[in-house]
Image (tube, grey):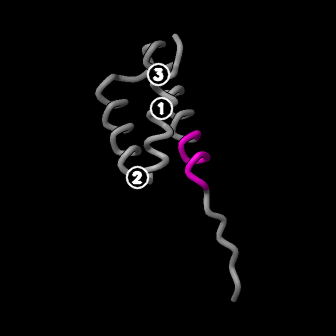
Amino acid sequence: MDVMVSAKDDLEIANEYFDLYMSLRAALRDGKIETTDVEAYLSYKEKLLPKKARELAQEMILNVKD
């Protein structure tokens, strides 16, 4: 049985993490979630990222303008 597995590239994975980061950041600003919850969840998700995707995501986060 042939099955196609679509693999995501590092940039796509980094963009998904960045979107999650921005969503959680907005929820923090609105008081909908606790800081410790956000830190724990982002730490967990970051550990799952491939090295290149992690570097790209960190670069995106550093370039966020408030």
| x then y, percent, for residue 32 | 45, 19
Mark 2 / mark 3, whichever is N-terminal: 3
Mark 1 / mark 2, whichever is N-terminal: 2
Q: Residues within 10 Å of mark 1 (few under 14, many from 20)?
A: few
Name the residue nearer the viewer: 42 or 27: 42
Mark 2 and mark 3 residues within 8 Å of each other at the beta carbon: no
Please report the residue visible at 70 percent of the width from the left and 74 percent of the height from the top: 4
Mark linked to residue 25:
3
Total of numbered circles in the picture?
A: 3
Using the image, determine if residue 48 lies above or below residue 31.
below
Q: Nearer the viewer, mark 1 or mark 2?
A: 1
Is residue 13 inside the magenta stretch?
A: yes
Name the residue nearer the viewer: 33 or 42: 42
Q: Quadrant of residue 42?
A: top left
* Residue type, label 1: Glu
| x then y, percent, for residue 45 | 41, 45
Structural distance between the alpha carbons of marks 1 and 2: 17 Å
Tell me: 11 left or right of 36: right
* Residue type, label 3: Arg
The residue under label 2 is: 48
Query: In the structure shown, which secondary structural element does the residue marked by tag 2 occupy?
Result: helix
| x then y, percent, for residue 35 | 33, 23
State which quarter of the image contains the N terminus: bottom right
- Magenta segment, which residues? 9-15
Structural distance between the alpha carbons of marks 1 and 3: 16 Å
Q: Nearer the viewer, mark 2 or mark 3?
A: 2
Using the image, determine if residue 44 lies above or below residue 22.
below
The residue under label 1 is: 59
